[in-house]
Image (spheres, rainbow, N blue to C red):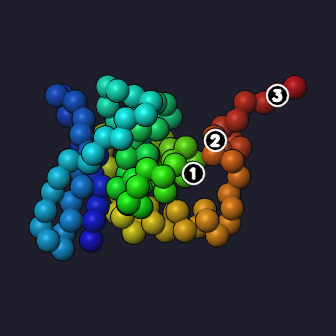
């Protein structure tokens, strides 16, 4: 089973990918699109956008497959992760993508409860 692990300490943060079936750990490849300084989580911004894109690219196998989903994934999953650290199983990522595909969830952006009120 593959698990994405976010670790934060005084030196900074990193995201690992652990595969428990083959007892292997590696650093998640940073797909740089918005944040050249790195990936982040626990809020919405450029670092979380890159983390969303990086996790989905790893999970789905290509940037092209991840592209339609990563902004919604940022808002609905990455922004809600604990800032101190997280563990996110691959199965949960794939389940989320499948649910979005099946339900055709609205446009990638903030959930309605986070959207500013327009008069």
Quadrant showing the C terminus = top right
- Crowding around mark 1 (Cα neighbors within 10 Å: few <14, some 14 to 19, many 20+) is few
Residue beneath label 2, please?
Answer: 109
The disc, 3 or 2, on the residue closer to the chain's N-terminal end is 2
Quadrant showing the N terminus = bottom left
CA gap between label 1 and label 2 equals 12 Å
Is residue 16 found left or right of 114 in the rendered image?
left
Assess whether mark 3 and mark 1 are in contact (beta carbons under 8 angstroms): no
Q: Quadrant of residue 17?
A: bottom left
Residue beneath label 1, please?
Answer: 68
Q: Describe the element under mark 1 as helix, strand or loop.
A: loop
Residue at the far left: name it.
23
Residue at left 19%, top 69%? 20
Labels 3, 2: front one: 2
Task: For residue 76, say whether it is visible.
Answer: no
- Crowding around mark 2 (Cα neighbors within 10 Å: few <14, some 14 to 19, many 20+) is some
Task: For residue 92, say whether it is visible.
Answer: yes
- Crowding around mark 3 (Cα neighbors within 10 Å: few <14, some 14 to 19, many 20+) is few
From the top left corner, tell me how far across and down residue 63 is, in percent: 43, 50
Judging depth in this view, the residue of 38 and 8 nearest the camera is 38
Q: Describe the element under mark 2 as helix, strand or loop.
A: loop
14 above or below 20? above
18 above or below 52? below
Residue beneath label 3, please?
Answer: 118
Q: Describe the element under mark 3 as helix, strand or loop.
A: loop
112 above or below 115? below
């Amino acid at each position: 089973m593959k698990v994405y692990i976010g670790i934060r300490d005084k030196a900074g943060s990193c995201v690992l990918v652990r595969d428990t079936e083959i007892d292997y750990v590696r650093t998640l490849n940073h797909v740089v699109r918005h944040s050249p300084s790195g990936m982040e989580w626990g809020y919405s911004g450029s670092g979380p956008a890159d983390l969303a894109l990086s996790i989905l690219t790893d999970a789905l196998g290509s940037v092209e497959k991840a592209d339609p989903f990563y902004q919604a994934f940022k808002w609905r999953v990455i922004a809600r992760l604990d800032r101190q650290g997280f563990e996110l199983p691959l199965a949960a990522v794939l389940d989320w993508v499948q649910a979005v595909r099946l339900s055709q969830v609205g446009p990638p952006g903030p959930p309605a409860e986070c959207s500013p009120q327009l008069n």
